[in-house]
Structures are given as structure tokens and as C-alpha cells.
Amino acid sequence: MTADPRPLVGAAHGPGTRDVAAAGKVVERYLDRMVAHDWDAMADCLAEDVVRVGPFGDTYSGKASYVAFLSGLLPSLAGYSMRLDRVVSQGRFAVAELTETVEIDGSPLETPEALVFDLDAQGRIAHISIYIQRLGAPA
């Protein structure tokens, strides 16, 4: 296997990548604890005044509100899973590329996404923006 000669910007991790920066570690832990439904550990990754902006402009402000939203939604999604493809980070900024899957009428529906994270000075997630790809849309 030949090493990739291109320099990394920040740090990336996932298949075939190198070291993880602090922001990437926080994002990875947040996503892992979210999928595990470990709401307390997930909440530890969030700033008190976190703002989450979803792909349709839906916004949740404040840790308690956001954790309540996720802890009510995720357990209700049939066949939910997440595949984390990579996290790229630099300083207090990180981007996660992932695919979430749910079952709709017994069939899996995959949604590729990119989540953009900003961390505060204490190393907690202060802002999350979610972007989705529409699969099967006409060209």
C-alpha cells in the first residue's frame, strides 16, 4: 500500500487515515453515545447553549431541549443505525460524514449526511449544522 502524498488539513480518521484531533474525538464520542442511547454521556459532549440546525431549518436551542428531542426520537425509529465514514477536524471545527438508516415499510432507507460542528473554548459542541444528500433525485 502506498502512502497518500497529499497533506492532511487538520486531522482525519476513519478507514486508512491518521491521528484524531481533539474536536474529532469529541464528535466521535457524541455520535457513538447518541447511537448507544447513552443520553448522559452524549450530553456531556454538548455546551449548555448548543444550537442544532437540521436539514430543513428545524432548530433546537439549549442542551436540555436538544437531548430531549434526540432521546424521544431515536428510540422510536425502526431499524435505526449509523455508519460513520469519517471525521475531519481542525482546531475547534469538525465535519462528520455519515449515513443514517431507518426502516420504512420494512425496507431500509439510507440517508447520507454531513454534520458540521463548532466547539466552544471548553471543548464542547456549541453548534451543529446538518446537511443531507437526496438519493434518487432526478439529475
Image (cartoon, rainbow, N blue to C red):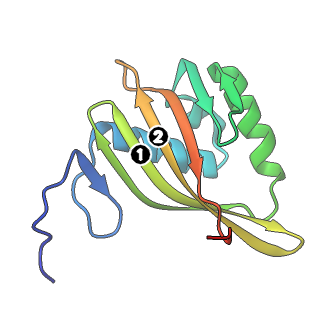
> Where is mark 1, residue-wise?
95
Identify the secondary structure beneath mark 1: strand
Image position, residue 54 (x, y; %): 65, 38
Image position, residue 4 (x, y; %): 15, 70
Image position, residue 62 (x, y; %): 64, 18
Nearer to the camera, 2 or 41: 2
Please name the residue shown 42% across and 30% down the image: 118
Amino acid type of the residue tagged 2 in the rendering: Val
Specify the label residue 77 is tagged with. Answer: none
Specify the label residue 116 is tagged with. Answer: 2
In which quadrant of the rendered image does the N terminus lie?
bottom left
Separation (CA) of disc 1 from disc 2: 5 Å
Where residue 85 sits, quadrant-wise, is bottom left
Contact between marks 1 and 2 (CB within 8 A): the answer is: yes
Instruction: Look at the picture and state if 60 lies above or below 2.
Output: above
Identify the secondary structure beneath mark 2: strand
Image position, residue 89 (x, y; %): 31, 43
Amino acid type of the residue tagged 1 in the rendering: Val
